[in-house]
Image (tube, grey):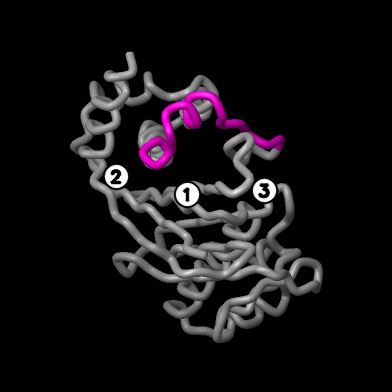
Amino acid sequence: MSIDLYLVKVLDSLDDKTLNRATCFLPFAIKEKIKSFYHKEDKVRSLLGYMMLKKILEYDQYSNAISFTKYGKPFIRDQEYFHFNISHSRNWVVLAVSKEEVGVDVEYVKPVCLETMEGALTKKEYEKLKSLSNHEAIKYFYMIWTIKESYLKMIGKGLSLSPNRLQTNVYAKKPTIMLDGKQQNVNIQTFQIESSYQISLCVREGGNIQIETLDAKKLLKDLIKKEEKYK
């Protein structure tokens, strides 16, 4: 089984006219989700995520079949073997697509006050964090955080389930995760892009990741052109 991972870089040069036109072609539920973001930058990131999804779906699927769970996870109705998840941070937006449940998280790696992160970690994780140099501790924290986020997004609970109930082992040959002490049967992959973004992917079954990077301007313009043909 393969997992498709699509990436698009957010560009400051995206003009408002193109962004507004692209938004007009989205289903009402997606428009409302995008509107819920306070900052324009987050609206743009969310828009690009859903436009990537739109690129790989049939027209009628995208227009009529996107719903949200009670925890806010989007899904495609009546598609047992099509699962997706979107994440964005700073300059990058990522979309993961799989035949099995999937979760993805991307985070820009920046200095943080590690003491304030204790509540998101188990005692064992926090002790390990304190034993590392500051540089290694920050790297370790973002690996843990993105793995936990990707798992929580995969199961559709988000942060309604406290991250400190999850125990990770990021230094194993294959990263693992436990919930309330019970090993979870999932496949986790974690890696960096541009040396300053950590991405973690969590799926029910393992598989090869196929990565494709898309151009933001071309993505929006091509989809606008395609949509106008349907009108």
Residue 58 magenta: yes
Residue 165 on image: x %, y %: 75, 64
Question: Mark 2 or 3, which is nearer the eye?
Answer: 3
> Where's the C terminus, which quadrant?
top left
Cα separation, mark 2 vs mark 3, equals 26 Å
Q: Amino acid at mark 1?
A: Ser
Residue 10 is marked as: 2
Query: Which label belongs to residue 87?
Result: 1
User: What stretch of residues is rendered in magenta?
Assistant: 54-70
Could you tell which of marks 3 and 1 lies nearer the N-terminus?
1
The outermost residue toward the left is 13
The residue positioned 56% from the left and 80% from the top of the image is 174
**Which SS class for mark 3?**
loop
Quadrant in the picture for residue 121: bottom right
CA gap between label 3 and label 1 equals 13 Å
Q: Which mark is residue 212?
A: none
Residue at mark 3: 156
| Circle 2 Cα neighbour tier, 10 Å, few/some/many (<14 / 14–19 / ≥20) | many
The answer to whether residue 90 is above or below residue 119 is: above
